[in-house]
Amino acid sequence: MSLFESIVQVFKNNPTPTAADVPEGVCPNCWGRNEYAGKFYEAMKNENVDINNINEKKGWVQDYADKHLSSIQLNHTDAETVCSKCKVTYKEA
Ligand SMILES: [Zn+2]
């Protein structure tokens, strides 16, 4: 699943997501910090992105994600998943 698809999924599950709604593939540890979840959902709100127009806004969302969220995307290795930012390791389920 791409980061964009993960974000769409979050909005499908909760049209007004909070910091507790973590897109799949990003580090939950980093995500909870203000500079990520808080700013991201605030930026989405300012841009008037919602579940009804998120596909039309795909370019904007992807651009934002590339700029601000790529640093906290999880890296998968054979045995585990690691956040390159905080170095927290998640065991593969
Ligand atoms: Zn992290």
Image (cartoon, rainbow, N blue to C red):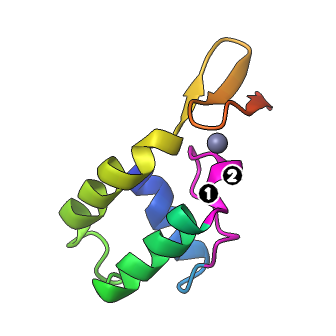
Name the mark on residue 28: 2
Query: Can you give x and y, in whole percent of width and height, for residue 47 in the image?
Result: 27, 83
Q: Residue at x 47, y 72 (%)?
A: 39
Circle 2: residue type: Pro
Q: Left or right of 12: which side holds 69?
A: left
Q: Is residue 35 visible?
A: yes
Q: Residue at x 44, y 81 (%)?
A: 42
Bin the neighbour count of mark 1 within 10 Å (Cα to Cα): few under 14, some 14-19, many 20 and up: many
Query: Can you give x and y, in whole percent of width and height, for residue 31 in the image?
Result: 61, 57
Name the mark on residue 1: none
Say whether marks 1 and 2 touch (CB < 8 Å).
yes
Whether the residue carrying mark 2 lies under 8 Å from ligand 1 is answered with yes
Q: Quadrant of residue 54?
A: bottom left
Q: Residue at x 52, y 62 (%)?
A: 36
Q: Is residue 52 magenta?
A: no
Q: Compared with residue 14, is residue 90 higher up or lower down, i.e. above or below?
A: above
Please name whichever residue, 38 or 18, is drawn nearer the observer in this view of the structure.
38
Q: Compared with residue 65, is residue 82 higher up or lower down, i.e. above or below?
A: above
**Which region is colored magenta?**
18-33
Q: Compared with residue 2, is residue 23 higher up or lower down, i.e. above or below?
A: below
Q: Left or right of 15: which side holds 77?
A: right
Whether the residue carrying mark 1 lies under 8 Å from ligand 1 is answered with yes
Which type of secondary structure does the marked residue at label 1 adopt? helix
Bin the neighbour count of mark 2 within 10 Å (Cα to Cα): few under 14, some 14-19, many 20 and up: many
Circle 1: residue type: Trp
Residue under circle 1?
31
Ligand 1, by image quadrant, is: top right
Query: Can you give x and y, in whole percent of width and height, for residue 17 in the image?
Result: 58, 79
